[in-house]
Image (cartoon, helix red, strand yellow):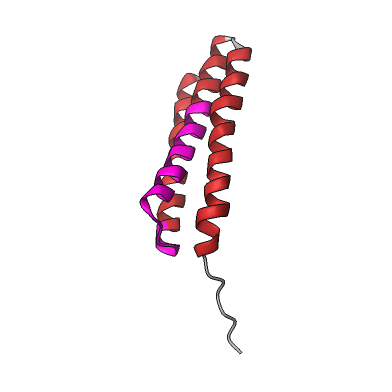
């Protein structure tokens, strides 16, 4: 079961790298925006890893705390960076008439 957790973590990491690469092709961002997004992704992945390991060890309270503290903080950080730093720079495509 533990091997499946690490496989799942690898898939999530790969998908997050692909998503950030796609974002870099769409919008030119400053270094602090990249730092916020990468930190948020790492925090979410760390929280998922912490929770998975804790649930496999039978310590559900630690897993729930890891999800709330690390993954929750990472999601909040990514949402704030997206709404305040990335979305204003994205330009809507013009419709061809």
Between residue 57 and residue 43, name the one nearer to us: 43
> Taking 58 as reference, is 33 left or right?
left
Residue reaching furthest top? 58
Spot occupied by residue 53 in the image (x, y as percentages of width and height): 51, 18
Spot occupied by residue 19 in the image (x, y as percentages of width and height): 46, 51
> Measured along the vertical axis of the image, is residue 26 above or below residue 47?
below
> Measured along the vertical axis of the image, is residue 50 above or below residue 97?
above
Does the rendering let one see residue 14? no
Residue reaching furthest left? 31
Between residue 46 and residue 27, name the one nearer to us: 27
Does the rendering let one see residue 72? yes
**Start and end of the magenta stretch?**
24-48
* Residue 40 on the magenta segment: yes
Residue name at image x 40 percent, y 54 percent: 21
Q: Main secondary structure of the magenta part?
A: helix
Residue name at image x 57 percent, y 25 percent: 69
In the figure, residue 94 lies in which quadrant?
bottom right
């Amino acid at each position: 079961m533990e091997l499946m957790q690490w496989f799942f973590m690898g898939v999530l990491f790969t998908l997050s790298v692909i998503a950030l690469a796609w974002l870099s092709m769409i919008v030119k961002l400053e270094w602090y925006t990249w730092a916020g997004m990468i930190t948020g992704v790492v925090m979410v992945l760390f929280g998922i890893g912490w929770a998975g390991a804790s649930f496999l060890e039978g310590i559900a309270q630690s897993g729930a705390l890891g999800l709330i503290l690390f993954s929750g903080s990472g999601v909040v950080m990514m949402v704030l960076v997206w709404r305040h730093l990335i979305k204003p720079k994205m330009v809507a495509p013009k419709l061809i008439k």
